[in-house]
Image: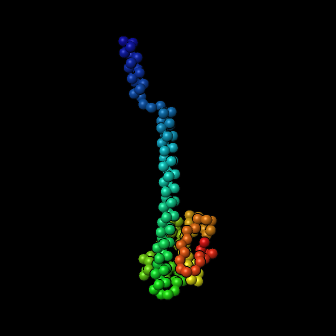
């Protein structure tokens, strides 16, 4: 009888569920896992934005070259490329307009990058034409 009662009490204790400490440990572990995944996702997003800006600049640069081949001169602004050479000019991945600087026999097209300001080492530039890259485009 006593033995049956002890077995019943032990069974009830196990059936009650998890303690608060056990739940907190599980939540901490889940938080650490979510944090590690979040960091990797945000780093991948940053890399994808930089690659996207580079590809956009190559496409714009090719359009500027096509404009030059057809007209014999460099465009004064990127808006001259629409719609014949470029379907539309969208913004860079950080929401800023791509910039264009004509410099003698060449040109630069660039994005200011993640910091959205010229300089700072994160600008993304594509140079084209015969002349050297402009100081403003760097």
Residue 27 drawn above or below residue 53: above
Q: Nearer the viewer, residue 91 or 58?
A: 58
Residue at image location 48% in from the left, 61% down from the top: 48
Residue 118's x, y, as percent?
Answer: 61, 69
- Name the residue at 52% across, 86% down: 73
Q: How many marks?
A: 0
> Vertically, is 127 above or below 40?
below
Rendered-image quadrant of the C terminus:
bottom right
Scheme by which the image is coloured: rainbow
Q: Residue, x 49% and y 87% (percent of image)?
A: 72
Q: Furthest residue to the top?
A: 1
Q: Residue at x 62, y 65 (%)?
A: 120
Tell me where residue 19 appears, x and y as whole percent.
47, 31
Q: From the viewer's side, name the closer residue of 31 and 112.
A: 112
Quarter in which the N terminus is drawn:
top left
Query: Would residue 37 be visible to someone looking at this image?
Result: yes
Looking at the image, residue 15 sits to the left or right of residue 92; the answer is left
Task: Please identify the residue farthest to the front as the structure is shown.
Answer: 130
Q: Nearer the viewer, residue 105 or 100?
A: 105
Residue 90 point in image, percent of width and height? 47, 72
Q: Is residue 102 visible?
A: no
Query: x, y (%) of residue 60?
Result: 48, 75
| 107 relative to 59 in the view: left or right | right
Figure check: 84 above or below 6: below
């Amino acid at each position: 009888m006593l033995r049956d009662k002890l077995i019943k009490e032990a069974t009830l204790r196990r059936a009650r569920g998890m303690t608060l400490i056990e739940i907190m440990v599980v939540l901490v572990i889940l938080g650490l896992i979510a944090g590690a995944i979040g960091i990797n996702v945000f780093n991948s997003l940053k890399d994808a934005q930089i690659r996207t800006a580079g590809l956009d600049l190559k496409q714009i640069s090719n359009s500027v070259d096509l404009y030059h081949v057809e007209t014999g001169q460099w465009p004064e602004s990127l808006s001259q490329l629409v719609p014949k050479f470029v379907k539309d000019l969208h913004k860079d991945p950080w929401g800023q307009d791509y910039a264009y600087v004509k410099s003698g026999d060449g040109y630069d097209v660039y994005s200011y990058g993640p910091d959205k300001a010229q300089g700072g080492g994160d600008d993304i530039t594509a140079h084209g034409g015969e002349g050297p890259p402009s100081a403003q485009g760097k």
